[in-house]
Image: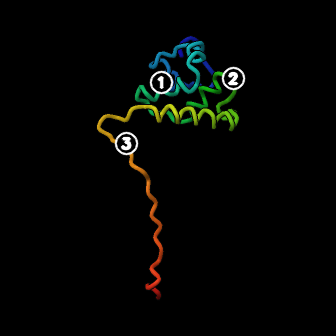
């Protein structure tokens, strides 16, 4: 973000956003918080969910910690859906099904 200082957007976040082509508030508004977050992720940076909340707060002019829980959940679900659609990194296979093993004591092993 180069044109103006936006709420919740610090120097590091602003640099990430500039590097993915989001230079102004209008650019961020056009992209929306989830798309902006995903652009940063796809660029190879490792943002936490706090960036997602900060982007929402910047657009709604509230502190990122004041974003309502319901809205946070919507943002996280949208981001997770977008992340699931990303291709796997080169050389990695998709994870197989998760299996849970519950160990039961053998009835013959009494102390």
The correct choice, above or below, for 106 with respect to 61 in the image is: below
Q: Is residue 22 left or right of residue 25?
A: left
Q: Circle 1 — which element?
A: helix
The residue singled out by tag 1 in the image is: 39
Mark 3 or 2, nearer chain start: 2
Quadrant for residue 90, please give it.
Answer: top left
* SS label for mark 3: loop
Percent of width and height locating residue 37: 52, 27
Query: Label 3 to label 2, Cα distance in Å?
Result: 39 Å
Instruction: Choose the circle earlier in sequence order: 2 or 1.
Output: 1
Provide the residue designation for mark 3. 94
Q: Residues within 10 Å of mark 2 (few under 14, many from 20)?
A: some
Residue 82 percent across, percent down from the top left:
50, 31
| Whether label 1 touches label 3, CB < 8 Å | no
Q: Which residue is mark 2?
A: 61
Coloring applied to the structure = rainbow
Q: Nearer the viewer, residue 100 or 53?
A: 100
> Residue 20: image x %, image y %?
46, 19
Question: In the figure, 109 relative to 65: above or below?
Answer: below
């Amino acid at each position: 973000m180069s044109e103006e200082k936006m709420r919740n957007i610090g120097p590091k976040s602003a640099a990430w956003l500039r590097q993915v082509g989001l230079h102004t508030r209008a650019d961020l508004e056009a992209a929306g918080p989830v798309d902006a977050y995903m652009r940063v992720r796809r660029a190879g940076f490792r943002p936490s969910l706090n960036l997602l909340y900060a982007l929402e707060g910047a657009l709604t002019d509230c502190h990122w910690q004041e974003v309502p829980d319901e809205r946070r959940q919507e943002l996280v679900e949208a981001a997770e859906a977008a992340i699931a659609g990303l291709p796997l990194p080169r050389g990695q296979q998709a994870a197989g099904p998760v299996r849970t093993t519950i160990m039961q004591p053998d009835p013959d092993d009494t102390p």
